[in-house]
Amino acid sequence: MNTSIQKKQYDIPLIECCFLLFLFMFPLWPEYAVIKPGSLPGINVQRLLVVIVFALWCLILLLSPAYYRRMIEFVQHYAWLTGLLLLMLGWKLCSVSVAAEPLHALFSAVRDTVFSLLLMLMTASIYARPAQLYRAIVVLLLAALVVVLLAVPEVIMEKNIIAQVVPVTSEYTESAISSKIRDDVYRAQATFAHPLSLAQFLVMILPLSLVLIMMHRSWKNVLLGTVTTILCAWGIFVTGSRSPLAIMAFLLAAFLIMRLLSSSFRDRMDYLRAASSLLLLLIAVVIGGDWLLSLIAGSSESEAMSSYYRLRQLELGIPLIGQHPLLGYGPGQAAATIGMVAQTVDNYFLTLALESGMPELLAFVLLILLLLIHLWTAAMHSHDRSARLLLMALFYSTLGYFSFLTIISLKQVMPLVFIMCGMGLSVKLQEDQQGHR
């Protein structure tokens, strides 16, 4: 019986409480929503919370050797992670020199990479026990519930309710709060800038809610996991997006493959599980192949045009990468480079290659592979059943997020991915160190 998570712990440190508040508010407060009191500069609550938590974290690092030691141990143990992020930052800074708008490109380059690195280091110093990881996942599920519930009146009224209270401060804000309709069907987006971003977030939440049901800690856990799973599935449906269906099919196939590869073949049950996984995978390929192709092609003219534009972006973008393979065209310049009216290109990998060149793209792909490998290895080698389940959920959530980047470039959810990876890797590192003592 697992004890590390089942022990009730009420001594939650202040920094963890603030971090949990940030986790809860992150998906609830739109990234484009800015409070503008009078003539004062606009305030984004997300960024304000980050500044508060970061300031508190810096203070605790100075006052508490334990937090500082954890961060240093994390950096030393996962030096490849810090090194790759710093390499990506350095290369982006180099690509700023070729950008048409250097100041905007500099802000874009520093914001994305530094923010991800700081959040991961902050998470690594705070999280050391499976119980903390469990609390964070519960908070994320509660936040997801609120997000989906906010989509209910939006679907009923067929109107973006956030648009009623958010002032328009930029073209991006105006685009974000505009109603999204396809084939006369309203597409919900809740607190996100686009229905696809909402779908991406909910697909990331689904593995966490399913694992909470599997843990069987209490009836409250099972109830929370079940309700979250049902509401997230409904939330994905009302986004009117085809992409999450394809991503979930891919995650199911990945689950069956990983289950097959992880079989130890020590007894008959191992052989039975492996055979059942292989059979289900073959059935899914045979039955789901045509369905997946028709899904990609689209069932209406507007869906077909959406798929066409994504392919067209690749046709236009790939030859342009060959003209500037090293530094690209500068951060923030991908859409303008291929002549798109929209502010983003519908493929983050294509965006990276266009903006900062092939070295940046290769570094990012390597980062993804190493993160996934370490999360899976951490789950397989964990001695704690609950921790193993939570780490596996983080693996599939991360895989789902990065798979989504093949069809969108919106990065609203990206900080959560680095936070979850930091949590999982840090908890496994502390578990290994305790086992060696």
Image (cartoon, rainbow, N blue to C red):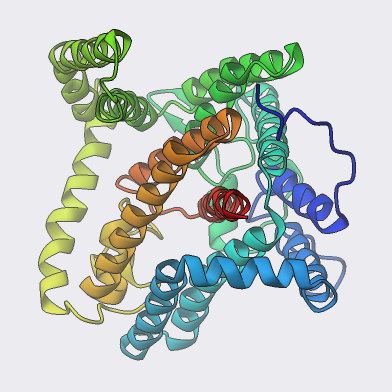
Q: Position of residue 102 (x, y in %)?
A: 43, 87
Q: Quadrant of residue 126?
A: bottom right
Q: Residue placed farthest to the bottom in the image?
A: 97
Q: Nearer the viewer, residue 293 or 286?
A: 286
Residue at image point 12% right, 55% down: 315
Residue 195, can we see it? no
Residue 173 vertical placement versus 81 (above, below) = above
Q: Nearer the viewer, residue 295 or 169?
A: 295
As drawn, is 290 to the left or to the right of 189?
Answer: left
Which residue occupies the foreground of this view, 138 or 360?
Answer: 138
Identify the residue at image location x=74%, y=11%: 219
Tell whether 328 sits left or right of 123: left
Q: How many marks?
A: 0
Height in image: 350 above or below 381? Answer: below
Q: Is residue 268 left or right of residue 231?
A: left
In the displayed structure, 170 sits above or below 107; it is above
Q: In the depicted view, which residue is nearer to us: 112 or 169?
A: 112
- Specify the quadrant that holds the C terminus: bottom right
- Residue at 16% x, 77% y: name it: 325
Compared with residue 303, is residue 71 higher up or lower down, i.e. above or below? below
**Which residue is rendered at x = 58% and y = 68% of the image?**
73
Residue 389 visible in the shown view: yes
Answer with the quarter of the image where residue 266 lies. top left
Position of the N terminus by quadrant: top right
For residue 322, side relative to residue 93 (left or right): left
Residue 17 in the image: state x and y as whole percent.
83, 50
> Residue 311: x and y, percent?
17, 46
Residue 81 position by quadrant: bottom left
